[in-house]
Amino acid sequence: MTRTKKTGMRARGGRVAVVGALGLASVVLAAVPAFAKGSVEITAPHAAHVGKAFTVTARGDDDAASYLQICLEGRSGGHAWHRVTCGAVVDTGTEARATAHVKAAHRGTQQYRAVLYGLTSPHDRHPVRERTSAVAKVAVR
């Protein structure tokens, strides 16, 4: 009788351990966030001449928000980023685009980046920054 009781306790303890491990695994898998698919690209010339205009374009998409808007930001001389232009608000599934025609005023390196914002409605006043592109550098000579 003693032997049967010990075996029964071990079997019950093993079942509890398996059920606990499965429960823990399901909680961990539920807590892992789903990653949204998307990308942001920026195109700018490598060099430009002082006084001449050049074009900087950006495009991007993301499936994390209902509406998207892409903006171009620029800076020169290590100053803070400032907004150059923004594209139109588009539905998710449509690629957001923005184009800026910039006139190089002085020599040096100008930097540009694209920022993709997610919106909950076409007139959302609090957009959320979804993605930022790599920095594109333009050497002005």
Image (cartoon, grey):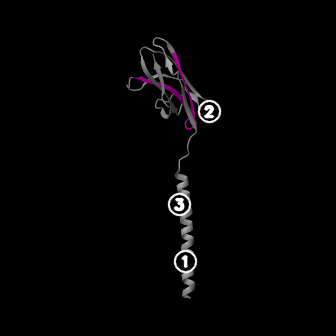
What is the tally of numbered marks visible in this picture? 3
The reply to whether callout 2 and callout 3 are in contact (CB within 8 Å) is no
Q: Could you say where residue 44 lies in the image, as x and y percent from the top left?
A: 53, 22
51 relative to 114, above or below: above
Question: What whole-number distance in Å separates the C-alpha atoms at marks 2 and 3?
Answer: 36 Å
Q: Could you say where residue 97 lies in the image, as x and y percent from the top left?
A: 56, 25
Q: Earlier in the sequence, mark 1 or mark 2?
A: 1
> Callout 2, which amino acid?
Gly
Q: Main secondary structure of the magenta part?
A: strand
Segment colored magenta: 54-76
Dot 3: within a 10 Å radius of its alpha carbon, few (fewer than 14), some, or many (20 or more) residues?
few
Secondary structure type for disc 1: helix
Q: Earlier in the sequence, mark 2 or mark 3?
A: 3
The reply to whether callout 1 and callout 2 are in contact (CB within 8 Å) is no
Question: What whole-number distance in Å separates the C-alpha atoms at marks 1 and 2?
Answer: 56 Å
What quarter of the picture does the C terminus occupy?
top left
Which residue matches tag 2?
93
Q: Is residue 71 magenta?
A: yes
100 relative to 39, above or below: above
> Callout 1, which amino acid?
Arg
Secondary structure type for disc 3: helix
Q: Is residue 102 magenta?
A: no
> Callout 3, which amino acid?
Leu
Which residue matches tag 3?
24
Which residue matches tag 1?
10
Q: Nearer the viewer, residue 30 or 126?
A: 30
